[in-house]
């Protein structure tokens, strides 16, 4: 079970990112728990300056803009 | 489930050569179309059963000409900006600005504010990221003011709709206001007016993301993606702005404009700021209005003040910043930036 956090204050792109993560996980058959982090303080504490950001099992893998679908698969598989 | 070795970012969709051929081709077609807008718009206007020189005819002609013109310009500017900005990121900007306490940190921050891609929805994490990395508050403000104030969309549309002279004046003064306002705010020692939790926050760990290696095609894709996102979002503001511009152009009597926004009425500059701040639109929506105002003889200083306050200061932005700034600091911030805008407005009304 992987824990994926999506960092973002709730703009449209953050929601799209969350949907992309869930879709990719379902496609790959990887069990994930997706958590949305919307609180500005927590976002900043995670070292994310440009949203949306993504962390997998506590490790930040992406910040700023929608993730590339191919890379997303890579993060979830790793 | 098969486990593959994951190669970095496999390319899907169009092959690379198609991008190298397609982007210049589309650009050329749009450029040619742009050159034919006057005959096309006159032809469309003639389809309406109104006299060309009537109020309604003038308004329709303005609208029919400006809508494709602004949308074409917007597409071009957003694409080029998107590609250029792919070389910048908030993380890199932070690394450049951190520790720049010297005087030239301010103009540098203004410059980077224009070049760094960031959406206003992430201005809070960005603000915290900057301040916690030891970037002085004033430098951070220069960055945050310059971003929207001298954005490429506003400048490009000014250039296309009003002319290069006014676009240059706007660039120089917008940049100066961002730099000087940041400097003044920095000198005021306002750190105590940050929200308490921000001050207590110790430097958030710098995200150690590996730098992405982008190919030219990746950057072109970013440009196209930006066009889809931004033009898809602001077209409605563009139509509303051009509609208002068309109404001003067609119906507003010139002598009334001179009375309200002429150079003689000294109060018109502060009034323009007071009206401009709560107006929530973006550069693409306000420039057609500016075009119509100037065409009707509004004073340049008053119009500049109006445009700057609409674009650079917005209430929703202030409400977002309320999470990190105490009300007092927001008020000081508003006052300092407004003072710069007022000074610019008065200066131009006085000079011209």
Image (cartoon, rainbow, N blue to C red):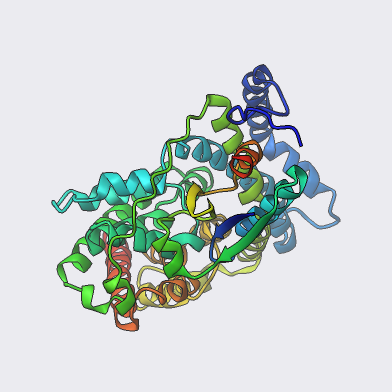
Q: Position of residue B218 (x, y in %)?
A: 57, 30
Q: Quadrant of residue B26?
A: top right
Task: Identify the residue at horizontal 26%, vertical 49% (top origin).
Answer: B97
Task: Examine the rendered structure and indicate whether residue B19 appears above or below residue A71.
Answer: above
Q: Position of residue B246 (x, y in %)?
A: 65, 60
* Residue B41 can be seen, yes or no: yes
Quarter of the figure that contains the N terminus of chain B: top right
Front-most of B6 and B102?
A: B6
Q: Relative to B309, is B6 above or below? A: above
Quadrant containing the C terminus of chain B is bottom left
Q: How many marks?
A: 0
Q: Nearer the viewer, residue B53 or B105?
A: B105
Residue depicted at x 33% and y 59%: B204
Judge whether B316 appears above or below A54 on screen.
below
Q: Please report the residue visible at 42 percent of the width from the left and 65 percent of the height from the top.
A: B124
Residue B232 on image: x %, y %: 68, 52
Q: Nearer the viewer, residue A13 or B182?
A: A13
Residue farthest along the bottom direction in this orientation: B328
Q: Is residue B266 visible?
A: no
Q: Position of residue B293 (x, y in %)?
A: 51, 62
**B13 relative to B219 in the view: left or right:** right
């Amino acid at each position: 079970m992987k824990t994926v956090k999506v960092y973002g204050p709730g703009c449209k792109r953050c929601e799209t990112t969350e949907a992309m993560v869930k879709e990719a996980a379902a496609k790959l058959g990887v069990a994930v728990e997706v958590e949305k982090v919307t609180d500005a303080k927590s976002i900043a504490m995670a070292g994310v300056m440009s949203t949306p950001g993504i962390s997998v099992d506590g490790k930040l893998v992406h910040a700023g803009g929608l993730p590339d679908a191919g890379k997303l698969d890579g993060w979830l598989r790793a | 489930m098969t486990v593959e070795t994951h190669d970095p970012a496999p390319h899907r969709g169009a092959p690379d050569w198609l991008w190298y051929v397609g982007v210049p081709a589309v650009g050329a077609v749009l450029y040619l179309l742009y050159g034919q807008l006057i005959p096309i718009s006159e032809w469309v206007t003639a389809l309406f059963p109104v006299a060309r020189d009537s109020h309604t005819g003038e308004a329709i002609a303005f609208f029919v000409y400006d809508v494709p013109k602004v949308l074409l310009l917007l597409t071009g500017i957003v694409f080029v900006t998107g590609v250029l900005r792919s070389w910048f990121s908030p993380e890199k900007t932070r690394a450049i600005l951190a520790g720049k306490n010297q005087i030239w940190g301010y103009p540098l921050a203004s410059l980077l504010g224009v070049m760094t891609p960031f959406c206003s929805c992430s201005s809070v994490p960005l603000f915290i990221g900057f301040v916690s990395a030891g970037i002085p508050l004033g430098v951070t403000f220069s960055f945050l003011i310059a971003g929207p104030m001298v954005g490429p969309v506003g400048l490009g549309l000014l250039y296309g709709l009003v002319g290069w002279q006014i676009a240059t004046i706007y660039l120089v003064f917008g940049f100066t206001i961002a730099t000087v306002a940041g400097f003044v705010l920095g000198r005021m020692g306002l750190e105590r007016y940050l929200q308490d939790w921000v001050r207590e926050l110790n430097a958030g760990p710098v995200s150690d993301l590996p730098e992405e290696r982008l190919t030219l095609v990746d950057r072109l894709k970013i440009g196209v993606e930006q066009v889809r996102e931004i033009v898809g979002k602001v077209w409605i503001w563009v139509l509303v702005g051009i509609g208002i511009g068309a109404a001003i152009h067609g119906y507003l009597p010139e002598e009334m404009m001179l009375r309200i926004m002429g150079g003689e009425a000294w109060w018109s500059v502060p009034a323009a700021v007071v009206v401009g701040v709560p107006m929530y639109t973006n550069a693409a929506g306000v420039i057609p209005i500016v075009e119509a105002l100037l065409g009707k003889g509004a004073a340049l200083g008053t119009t500049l003040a109006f445009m700057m306050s609409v674009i650079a200061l917005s209430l929703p932005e202030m409400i977002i910043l309320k999470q990190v700034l105490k009300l007092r600091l927001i008020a000081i911030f508003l006052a300092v930036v407004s003072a710069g805008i007022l000074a610019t407005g008065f200066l131009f009304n006085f000079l011209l």
